[in-house]
Image (tube, helix red, strand yellow):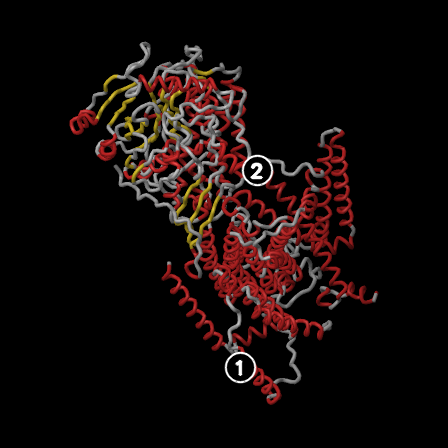
């Protein structure tokens, strides 16, 4: 048994490919926990960043700088009374959030955080991702219908129409990226997520910059469509507060509502991961070919630990700036502890074996974090599209452009 | 007489109990508890899919019988009540009321009082427009301007608080002038504010004016022609955005407005975007007026000679001012006693709200929200 | 509306007897109402106190025009404090309003309201405040109505009169013929009485309504 | 690659498919039927996966479960369901129906027994790694013509749908 467990460590594939069930389960647990923590962190970051965009402070009370706010929120939501509207279809009402949650989390099976840091590598990886994430539409439709109320119904109709429409443009953009993988030296393309990143490594270019305007346009289309796909501002019509109160989850509260939120944020991270994998070179560090050599490798591998140290310093600056009053003692201690924790993580990341293994994950996460920040930025800046305008953008702008990009990529690829 | 608007017939609000292909007519109830109806307005929408076939407003949830109260209070006692109508522009309400009673009493407020009145009223117009901009943008989905406008509105409210002790329902004026002399540093505060705000207005405009989504959401939305505006009695920025250059401050000047030099911003298309631009320009013009008023603030008394017990001679008078929302009029009938015999308030929001149905027909649900926002109604004033 | 017939009649009750706390206001009001009914029944401005301003006759081509066409139907044209007022006979008022709107460019109906003088033979003054954009001129048109007398709706002249007339109906119980949608506007559909009539005291909240709909004592 | 617990998953998915198929026709509420159908389609996708046809499984999920069924649900949700719930679910032709079902079943069994030669006894396993590529090559190589015909047919259907829908606007 122990051999079975340790044998994987020497293999150079994902646990799924190695067929190692134990490690696959461990990976699943790690990914699930990691995504849940990421969702919480994202929740906190969104509230904080959005608040600072809007000259507010955001959560400040629960823990230093509101660090424990997501946990407090989670506890609040879990302990809330579970309300099911009287005329709701109880079974469907109950299943809908689960479907969204499952769909959002199932996607993580194929996301490659590193060459071997994925639960498995499916031959149809990207197809699987698109397919599973398209299932979350079902949850939205079911939630809206089961609530048996006008606002959720309209919200879910809007939402599902929107998701289906943008899936088309999104798929086209993805296909153009996949086409680029088939233009490698061996001449065979791939749908596998790991394969796509490896193709970028092999071709020595991120697909964002390949065939210059083409790759970039495809990426831009995907970046727009993914915001619409996750129902976020400026495409947050299904949840348009001012029109439909809360869209398809108007009637939901407590735990079920938190499942929707969890699913939404998990889906945001998931689609960002697709974008990173397809266009931004996945786990590859920046300039892998321009800046080569042992010195650069070392410099880049030190970055993760360095980032954590910077965060630790920021936390300590916060500690110093805390008012010296007994009322703030707990807060100061908590922040100091958090800073120490960050610093320790940073120091651990400097250790050579950890450093080498963790680097891929760091770069992947950093790129995803960029998209997460963009999500917040959009929300702070843009008004909301109207439904017909949203549809027009989807069908009359994004779809033709993405088709053009697809054809262009194929032509350019054949010519070159 | 413009071609009169075909009067919208009342909706048949039967339940849409139809099956299959007829089932796309939907009655949607918005409010009275709805984030976008700015208070307790209830709007019943008749929809075809997302298209609005007609709306019906149900109002009166905030009815407090202000007119009846007015008939049972003395002239001075009723003064604070008017602040509670349009509570985001309380100073304007007070100005209209005081001027009407002064007219009835044949009293003229002193020049200095009139200047102070103009400064405070224009500050209030700015506050009202800022509140409108923030909530309107929030309705259309832009969260951030709300916080910016509230930050800057706060400065106005601080000046009010320093001047009269209250921030919202100020009761700033008395019949015959102002009760309070300006506090020390009033001019400095107002001047600082006048210098402080223009960059902030630029900031709002930067966020919205050329924002593609904002333009798409507001252009050609809730259009209303000048003829329809006049026929429906719509006034204020809504009328001006339709291209009618009419502002009571210019047409029938009151207080000290004839002393100042300012423009009346006018729109062309009468759509939501033009109304937005008109109000933004109005904010700048208000600043212009405030600057002139505070620089030319004359010395002198602030209160005219008004009898302790006000008994206006029997008679009736209608007087109106340009409130931030439109024409705010008071029609007072006096019978020579200490109380008004009839106290009628002509609220701009109430009359403007009538245009909602015309403005949203054929548009989408999301536009209803935008149009309610752009009408800039305050339910306290609609319902009184 | 059924409550129309049930509504308190003018002069029947006089001042309502509210609970203690407001007797003075009520007394003052009833005295005032009585006085106004005696002395200012026709034209309140005409019998102003010695010190007060006096309404002067208003002469203008418009008035002359109307007087020649309608003769004694234009019972008064005066200017009080610089504000012009026409008092018309109720039978021709609607026609004149239409002429004012269509021929004399009074294209903006500012307000429609009413005043109640319970002691008078014709207890209601119905007041239009008109404004002309081209002339930059305001005009007040008044007519007197009997209890239960209905009046042609001016919503066909100015569509904006719709809600204003609904409010007059709601508050005074005056009915407008041909109004597209004459329902109560501010008060609930099942409210009884019309609050701005003088015989509807401020204390006299509809206790029954409050009791039935809110389940509390009205607290007045 | 060693498959894990293959028989278990096969029977599990097969049972799930059958169960959901039965639910589809027995549920009175059309939305529940549609949801059961989705479950059946997903189970089928699982079966495809077990047959080493991941591409077909993926397409099954995207097109059927994700796309077509959402449209189904759309229509069902918009239509008033009250009436269908009150109506009798099965009409009186159960005798004819069961006869037809028996006949069809018999036919299938007969084909299976008689034409055993037609079915490959030993499955030629396609390498999982290049499954998608092979599907692509077949579609765009050997079956190019039928593939294009099918897409043309769909185009005609789309245009027809647009024309019919436009008339009502």
Residue lying furthest front = C12
Residue A170 higher or lower than C5, as above or below: below
Task: Give coordinates of residue A123: x percent, y percent.
Answer: 63, 68
Q: Relative to A362, is A207 on the left or the right?
A: left
Mark 2 chain: A
Work out whether disc 2 and disc 1 sit on a shared chain: no
Q: What number is the disc on residue A169?
A: none
Q: Which residue is mark 2?
A: A54
- Near-viewer residue (A150 or B287): A150
Instruction: Give the quadrant of residue B372.
Output: top left
SS for tag 2?
Answer: loop
Measuring from the top left, give residue B188's x and y in whole percent: 51, 19
Residue that numbered label 1 is attached to = D100
Tag 1's secondary structure?
helix
At a point 68% along the width and 42% down the height, the residue shown is: A69
- Choose top left, top right, bottom left or bottom right for residue B262: top left
């Amino acid at each position: 048994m122990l051999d079975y467990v340790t044998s994987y460590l020497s293999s150079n594939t994902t646990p799924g490919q190695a067929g190692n069930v134990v490690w696959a389960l461990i990976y699943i647990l790690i990914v699930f926990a990691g995504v849940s923590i990421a969702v919480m962190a994202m929740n906190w970051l969104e509230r904080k960043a959005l608040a600072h965009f809007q000259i507010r402070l955001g959560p400040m009370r629960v823990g230093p700088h509101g660090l424990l706010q997501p946990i407090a929120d989670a506890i609040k939501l879990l302990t809330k009374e579970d309300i099911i509207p009287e005329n709701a279809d109880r079974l469907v009402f109950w299943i809908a959030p689960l479907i969204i949650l499952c769909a959002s989390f199932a996607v993580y099976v194929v996301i490659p955080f590193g060459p071997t840091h994925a639960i498995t590598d499916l031959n149809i990886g990207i197809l699987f991702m698109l397919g599973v994430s398209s299932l979350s539409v079902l949850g939205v439709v079911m939630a809206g219908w089961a609530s048996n109320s006008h606002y959720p119904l309209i919200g879910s109709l809007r939402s599902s129409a929107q998701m289906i429409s943008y899936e088309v443009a999104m798929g086209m953009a993805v296909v153009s990226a996949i086409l680029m993988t088939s233009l490698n030296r061996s001449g065979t393309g791939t749908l596998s997520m790991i394969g796509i990143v490896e193709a970028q490594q092999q071709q020595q270019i991120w697909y964002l910059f390949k065939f210059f305007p083409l790759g970039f346009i495809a990426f831009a289309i995907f970046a727009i469509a993914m915001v619409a796909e996750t129902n976020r501002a400026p495409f947050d019509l299904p949840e348009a507060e001012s029109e439909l109160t809360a869209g398809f989850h108007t009637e939901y509260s407590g735990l079920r509502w938190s499942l929707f939120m969890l699913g939404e944020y998990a889906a945001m991270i998931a689609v960002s991961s697709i974008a990173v994998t397809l266009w931004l070179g996945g786990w590859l560090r920046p300039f892998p070919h321009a800046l080569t050599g042992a010195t650069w490798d070392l410099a880049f591998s030190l970055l993760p630990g360095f980032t954590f140290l910077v965060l630790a310093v920021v936390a300590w600056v916060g500690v110093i700036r805390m008012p010296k009053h007994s009322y703030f003692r707990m807060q100061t201690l908590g922040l100091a502890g958090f800073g120490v924790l960050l610093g320790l993580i940073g120091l651990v990341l400097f250790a050579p074996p950890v450093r080498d293994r963790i680097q891929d994950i760091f770069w992947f996460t950093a790129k995803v974090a960029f998209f997460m920040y963009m999500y917040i930025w959009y929300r702070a800046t843009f008004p909301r599209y109207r439904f017909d305008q949203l549809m027009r953008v989807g069908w009359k702008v994004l779809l033709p452009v993405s088709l053009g990009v697809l054809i262009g990529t194929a032509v350019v690829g054949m010519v070159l | 007489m413009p071609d009169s608007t075909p009067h919208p017939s009342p909706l048949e609000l039967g339940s849409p109990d139809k099956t299959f292909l007829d089932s796309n007519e939907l009655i949607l109830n918005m409010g009275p508890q709805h984030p976008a109806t700015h208070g307790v307005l209830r709007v019943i929408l008749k929809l075809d899919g997302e298209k609005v076939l007609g709306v019906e407003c149900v109002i009166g949830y905030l009815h407090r019988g202000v007119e009846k109260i007015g008939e049972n209070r003395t002239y001075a006692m009723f003064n604070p009540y008017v602040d509670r109508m349009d509570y985001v522009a309380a100073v304007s309400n007070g100005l209209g009321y005081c001027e009407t009673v002064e007219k009835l009493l044949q009293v003229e407020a002193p020049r200095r009082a009139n200047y102070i009145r103009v400064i405070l009223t224009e500050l209030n117009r700015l506050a009202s427009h800022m509140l409108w901009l923030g909530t309107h943008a929030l309705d259309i989905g832009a969260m951030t301007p709300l916080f910016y406008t509230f930050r800057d509105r706060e400065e106005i409210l601080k000046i009010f608080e320093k001047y009269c002790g209250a921030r919202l329902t100020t009761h700033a004026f008395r019949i015959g002038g102002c009760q309070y002399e300006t506090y020390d540093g009033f001019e400095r505060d107002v001047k600082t504010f006048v210098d402080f705000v223009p960059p902030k207005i630029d900031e709002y405009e930067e966020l919205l004016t050329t924002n593609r989504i904002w333009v798409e959401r507001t252009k050609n939305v809730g259009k209303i022609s000048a003829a329809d505006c006049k026929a429906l009695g719509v006034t204020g920025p809504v009328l001006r955005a339709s291209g009618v250059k009419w502002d009571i401050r210019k047409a029938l000047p009151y207080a000290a407005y004839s002393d100042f030099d300012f423009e009346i911003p006018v729109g062309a298309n009468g759509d939501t975007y033009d109304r937005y631009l008109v109000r933004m320009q109005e904010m700048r013009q208000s600043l212009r007026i405030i600057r002139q008023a505070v620089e030319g603030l004359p010395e002198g008394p602030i209160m005219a000679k008004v009898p302790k017990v006000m008994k206006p001679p029997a008679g009736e008078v209608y007087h109106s001012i340009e409130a931030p929302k439109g024409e705010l009029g008071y029609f007072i009938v006096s019978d020579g006693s200490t109380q008004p015999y009839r106290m009628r308030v002509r609220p701009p929001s109430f009359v403007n709200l009538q245009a909602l149905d015309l403005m949203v027909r054929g548009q989408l649900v999301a536009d209803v929200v935008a149009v309610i926002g752009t009408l800039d109604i305050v339910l306290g004033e609609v319902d009184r | 509306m059924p409550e129309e017939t049930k509504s308190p009649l003018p002069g029947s009750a006089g001042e309502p007897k509210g609970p203690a706390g407001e007797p003075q206001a009520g007394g003052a009001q009833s005295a005032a109402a009585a006085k106004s009914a005696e002395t200012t029944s026709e034209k309140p401005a005409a019998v102003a106190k010695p010190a007060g301003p006096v309404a002067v006759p208003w002469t203008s081509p418009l008035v002359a025009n109307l007087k020649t066409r309608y003769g004694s139907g234009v019972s008064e044209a005066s200017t009080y404090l610089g504000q012009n007022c026409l008092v018309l006979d109720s039978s021709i008022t609607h026609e004149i309003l239409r002429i004012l709107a269509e021929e004399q460019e009074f294209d903006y109906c500012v307000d429609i309201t009413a005043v109640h003088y319970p002691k008078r033979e014709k207890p209601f003054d119905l007041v239009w405040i008109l404004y002309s954009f081209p002339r930059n001129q305001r005009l007040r048109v008044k007519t007197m109505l009997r209890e239960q007398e209905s009046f042609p709706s001016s919503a066909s002249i100015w569509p904006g009169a719709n809600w204003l007339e609904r409010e007059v109906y709601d508050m005074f119980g005056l009915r407008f013929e041909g109004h597209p949608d004459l329902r109560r506007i501010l008060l609930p559909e099942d409210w009884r009485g019309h609050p701005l009539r003088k015989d509807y005291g401020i204390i006299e909240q509809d206790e029954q309504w409050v009791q039935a709909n809110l389940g509390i004592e009205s607290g007045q | 690659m060693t498959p894990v617990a293959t028989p278990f998953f096969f029977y599990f998915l097969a049972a799930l498919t059958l169960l959901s198929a039965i639910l589809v026709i027995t549920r009175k509420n059309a939305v529940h039927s549609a949801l059961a159908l989705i479950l059946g389609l997903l189970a089928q996708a699982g079966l495809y996966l077990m047959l080493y046809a991941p591409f077909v499984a993926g397409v099954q999920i995207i097109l059927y479960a994700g796309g077509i069924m959402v449209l189904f649900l759309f229509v069902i949700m918009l239509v008033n369901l009250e009436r269908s719930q009150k109506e009798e679910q099965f009409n009186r032709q159960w005798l004819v129906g069961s006869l037809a079902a028996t006949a069809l079943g018999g036919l299938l069994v007969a084909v299976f027994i008689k034409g055993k030669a037609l079915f490959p006894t030993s499955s030629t396993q396609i390498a999982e790694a290049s499954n998608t590529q092979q599907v692509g090559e077949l579609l765009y190589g050997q079956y190019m013509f039928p593939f294009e015909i099918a897409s043309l047919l769909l185009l005609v259907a789309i245009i027809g749908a647009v024309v019919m829908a436009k008339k009502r606007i």
